Image: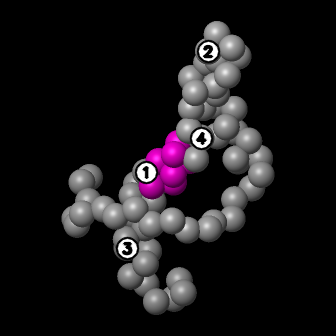
Amino acid sequence: MPPKSPLIRVHVNIELAAETLQTVVATCKARAGADQRARYRVDTADALAGLISRFLQDAGFDQYCKDPNHY
């Protein structure tokens, strides 16, 4: 479902399990593969941001925020 208003990028601090971050990094590295010098050319921070953004859109974060009981 497309967003109802334009999206903006915000930089925030969030808490997530270390295991989750390890999974994201390992998955990104596996998908990207190493170059000839055994270096991985992937931005795991951007990948994590994309995953979280898609999750928030799919999970209905807009509706969640409208409920004052969640604050």
Amino acid at dot 4: Thr
In the picture, which quadrant includes the C terminus?
bottom right
What is the C-alpha distance between the residues marked 4 and 3? 28 Å
Residue 24 image point, x, y percent: 64, 40
Tell me, for residue 44, which label it has, or none.
Answer: 4
Tag in front: 4 or 3: 4
Amino acid at dot 3: Gln
Q: Farthest residue to the right: give it.
A: 18
User: Which residue is rendered at x = 34% and y = 64% of the image?
Assistant: 8
Q: Is residue 55 left or right of residue 43?
A: left
* Label 1 neighbour load within 10 Å: few <14, some 14-19, many 20+: few
Mark with earlier residue (2, 1): 2
Q: Quadrant of residue 66?
A: bottom left
Mark with earlier residue (1, 4): 4
> On screen, 70 above or below 19?
below
Amino acid at dot 2: Asp
Residue annotated with mark 1: 54
Mark with earlier residue (2, 4): 2
The reply to whether callout 4 and callout 3 are in contact (CB within 8 Å) is no
Tell me, for residue 63, which label it has, or none.
Answer: 3
Magenta stretch mostly in which secondary structure? helix
